[in-house]
Image: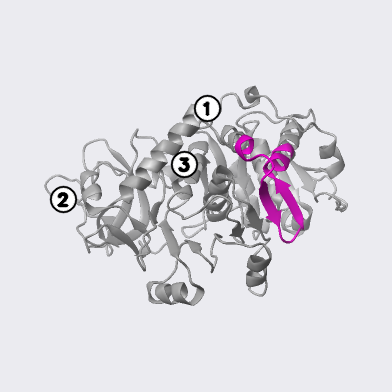
Amino acid sequence: QYEAMQALKAATLQQLANADAASNAADFFEHCVDRHGDALCVSAVDHKARYSFNELDAAANRFAWWGLSADVNLRPLDTVALLMENRPEFLAITMGLAKIGVTIALLNTNLTGALLRHAVEVSGARVVIASAVKSANWISVGTELSRPVDVWWYAGEGAAIPSVPVDEGSVRNWKLDAERLAALPAARVGREARHGVDARTPLYYIFTSGTTGPSKAAKFSHKRFIGAAVTWAGPSGLQKGDPYYITLPLYHGNAGVVAVAPCYLLGNPIVLREKFSASNFFKDIREHNVSTPSFSPLRVAIGNGLRADIWSLIQARFHITQVVEHYGSTEMPGDAILNYLNRPGSCGFLPAEVALAKSTTGEGGVLVRYDVEADAVVRDSATGFCIPCVAGEVGEMIMRLPDGLYDGYVGDAATRRKLYEGVFEEGDRWWSSGDLLQTDELGFFYFVDRAGDSF
């Protein structure tokens, strides 16, 4: 089954490459639109809005043309910070800005004051798109930033934008209203508008949870967005046409990437709620005929953190055929590892014989011995190299950087702290997860704890 999954992934990537849709997320998205056309792409529960793939593409195109307007003047490799709740325009904005080569910093909508200011400062954005309903969050930031910032306020079609704040300090405020967008072309911008963007260019800056200090902006490349689509489309149990219920925030990788990307690829409708609601959960699933959502109690449950002691009980209670758990992080250099075999408590799977063959390549991740008391990896006293763990032994998850390069975070110092060198040979470089895991004899991974005092 593992080999079949790997073969499917390779074949899908080759198909995308043959269609010239594997180098950046905009090309990938437009390829998906051309395949799925008038099929439903997103249905917003809170906003009562529905977009087909063609309609979402048209909306994205208008945001792209807006970005190219003289008073906005965005260029490839610029950064725009997005402060917006779950709504279809979030998807249109991200794909629209990708069409003109812009990196989008996805701001946590729960942040206020100094924490939100820190995120904007770190991102380097000179333009912010802010939802009008998040005005209190933004106003708490203050007006004195380290550089001039243009804030464009958006309220959505048919909604009035409240009076924008008065320009003050380094902040200028603008209205991005539906009338202006409607007057812009629905046709696509030319691919030359994203000239210079390649697979390694950051599509997103996704902010860490802040377990080791202020949130860091992790670079999330175009390649990883496309890779997530391919990785999750097969083993997740998604079938073409399955509605996918998303209540997690789109600024987080679990929703904005793990859920959204495979839906684009397969042509699955996204059922989007602004935030999780226990009282509306089953009602939404019935009304929208949801069969394969994120954390759905129907056929497939996708996510992470389901405890082993209740795993089987949950499956039996809600008749879930397949639970897909995964281990990954926004800043990791490779794809997540997946447990698509219904192994209770496991967060990923790599056959033991495959793991052994790849123990020094780092593909899929390797566990090395870790001294919890010293808060450091254990190195062989004779060679100075790290020591791979055996089955049942707890160790730190690390991944090799095949070309020695790591996108990491915005800021070199934070990136360097996530790297090990000379792990299995002189000069090799590996990503440090800071997570302690263990494997069994078959190759199933189990999360144990965070290393050190970072949790």
- Graded by Cα atoms within 10 Å as few (under 14), some (14 to 19) or many (20 or more), the crowding at tag 3 reads many
Residue 123 visible in the picture: yes
In the rendered view, would you say 197 is above or below 384? above
Residue 89 visible in the picture: no
Q: Is residue 428 left or right of residue 234?
A: left
> What number is the disc on residue 267?
none
Element type where label 3 sits in the image = helix
Q: Earlier in the sequence, mark 2 or mark 3?
A: 3
Q: Is residue 214 left or right of residue 6?
A: right
Residue lying at the far left in this picture: please name it.
Answer: 382
Residue receiving disc 3: 227
Q: Nearer the viewer, mark 2 or mark 3?
A: 3
> What number is the disc on residue 20?
1
Residue type at numbered disc 3:
Gly
Q: Earlier in the sequence, mark 3 or mark 1?
A: 1
Image position, residue 287 (x, y; %): 69, 66
Image position, residue 290 (x, y; %): 61, 62
Image position, residue 267 (x, y; %): 59, 46
Specify whether residue 53 is painted magenta.
yes
- Graded by Cα atoms within 10 Å as few (under 14), some (14 to 19) or many (20 or more), the crowding at tag 2 reads few
Q: Nearer the viewer, mark 3 or mark 1?
A: 1
Q: Residue sitting at 65 percent across and 68 percent down?
A: 286
Marks 3 and 1, Cα distance to the nearest angstrom? 15 Å
Residue type at numbered disc 1:
Asp
Residue receiving disc 2: 380
Specify whether residue 315 is painted magenta.
no
In the rendered view, would you say 147 is above or below 432? above
266 or 232, which is in the foreground?
A: 266
Q: Is residue 401 left or right of residue 118?
A: left
Image position, residue 452 (x, y; %): 36, 62
